[in-house]
Amino acid sequence: MTDKLPIYDSIDHAIRLVEEERRRIARDLHDGPAQALTNLSMRLNLIQRLLISRPELANREIDKVNHGILQAVNEIRRLIYDLRPMAVDEVGVISATRELCQRFAREWNCRIQVESDDAAYLRLSPAKQVIVYRMVTEMLHNVHKHAGASQIQVKFVYANDTWRISVSDNGIGFRPADVPSGCYGLIGLRERAELLGGTLSVDSADSRGTTVTVNIPQA
């Protein structure tokens, strides 16, 4: 007699998404503020030794430590914001996405264009808007990490009682069939789409850029 296969439902998907988000935050904390603070601690030990023997060098190191502290604080603030993007609650997912894309464009030195009907987001509940915002954020991070793109386009389209959200880039592209399971964050994105009763598709090829599209029904 064989064991029964496990049954997965929407609750399992939601739990998996929460755990995946926790792992991402833990990874970001480890790679960002935690390493920065470790480095700052080492610099403080160096400053202690330099204060008597080489005070001028100690002062320069103090300036570097101060700059490092400000960077760590900004990174922690970003992580706190990612935990609950208040801008989505205040101005809606489209305006919040525009603000996010402006920040990423400055940080990544690339062009990011957002096209949408600004009133269309009112058709989505606040909770769904937060999920959509997180999906767009994940897709943009994937482009930044993997695509080597100089231009990114985000589109919000509402037609026939269906939301269509797409992120396109002019990067190196890839063959979706050749990507190992779990790469590019596609599993988490697809599960988020399914949680909203929608679907996710990927159109890409080598040297042709990539478009990731999410379709979410209004119901």
Image (cartoon, grey):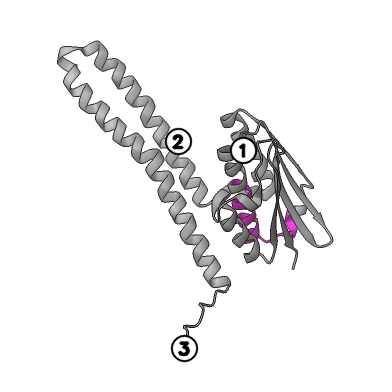
- The answer to whether the residue labelled 2 contacts the one labelled 1, judged by CB atoms less than 8 Å apart, is no
Q: Which sits earlier in the primary sequence, circle 3 or circle 2?
A: 3
Q: Residue furthest right?
A: 160
The residue nearer to you, when weighing 85 against 19, is 19
In the depicted structure, whether residue 96 falls above or below residue 108: below
Which amino acid type is shown beneath numbered disc 2? Asn
Outermost residue to the bottom: 1
| Residue 128 on the magenta span | yes
Left or right: 172 in relation to 22: right
Residue 89 appears at what percent x and percent y? 61, 53
Residue that numbered label 2 is attached to: 74
Regarding mark 2 in the picture, which secondary structure is present there?
Answer: helix
Q: Say which mark, if any, is on residue 1.
A: 3
- Of callouts 1 and 3, which one flags the residue occurring earlier in the amino acid sequence? 3
Q: Magenta segment range? A: 121-137
- The numbered disc on residue 147 is 1
As measured in the structure, the alpha-carbon distance from the residue carrying label 2 to the one carrying label 1 is: 26 Å
**x, y (%) of residue 108?**
58, 31
- Numbered circles on residues, count: 3
Q: Nearer the viewer, residue 18 or 208?
A: 208
* Image quadrant containing the C terminus: bottom right
- Of badges 3 and 2, nearer the viewer stands 3
Q: Position of residue 209 (x, y in %)?
A: 70, 39
Q: Say which mark, if any, is on residue 49.
A: none
Tell me the element at label 1: helix
